[in-house]
Image: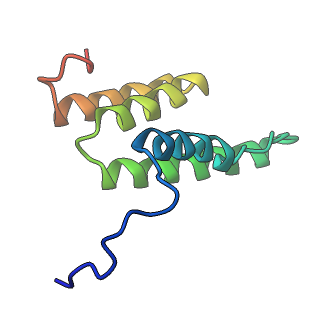
Amino acid sequence: AREVQNKAAAPVQITAEQILREAHEMRFEQEPVAPKQQITDPEELKLYKLRKRKEFENIVRRNRLSVACWLKYGAWEEAQKEFERARSIFERLIDIDYTNHTVW
C-alpha cells in the first residue's frame, strides 16, 4: 500500500453528516420517474403483461431466495386480476421458503 504523502489537514473539513446528507439529496435527484403508459388495445396490453412477466421471472431467477421479489410478482399478478397465476407464484414461493413468516 502506498503511504499518504500529504498529512496536513485539508483547508475545508467535511463531516460524515455532510457526506450522508449530500448522498441522501442526490438519491432523490437521480430517481427516474416512470412515464405513465396509456394502453389502447388488447394486443398492447398482452405485450405489456408478457414484458412485465419476463422482467419478474428474471428478477426471481436472479434472487431466488428474496421473498420480497416473489411477493411483488404475486401482488402484480393479483392487480392484473390473474388469480391463477398469482396463486402459482405464491405456491412456488412456498416451495422455496415455507419457513419464512412473511410468506404466510
- Tell me where residue 62 appears, x and y as whole percent: 32, 55
Q: Pick whichever, 78 or 62, lies toward us.
A: 62
Give the total number of marks visible in the rendering: 0
Q: Pick whichever, 20 or 42, lies toward us.
A: 20
Quarter holding residue 16: top left
Q: Is residue 6 left or right of residue 29?
A: left
* Rendered-image quadrant of the C terminus: top left
Quarter holding residue 96: top left
Q: What residue is shown at x 68% (from left), y 46% (from top)?
A: 29
- Tell me where residue 70 appears, x and y as whole percent: 36, 35
Q: Is residue 25 left or right of residue 16?
A: right
Query: Quick one: which residue is furthest to the left in this view?
Result: 99
Q: Is residue 85 above or below residue 9?
A: above
Q: What residue is shown at x 11% (from left), y 23% (from top)?
A: 99
Q: Is residue 73 left or right of residue 30?
A: left
- Tell me where residue 33 appears, x and y as whole percent: 72, 43
Q: What residue is shown at x 72% (from left), y 44% (from top)?
A: 34
Q: Is residue 86 left or right of residue 92?
A: right
Q: What residue is shown at x 85% (from left), y 39% (from top)?
A: 38
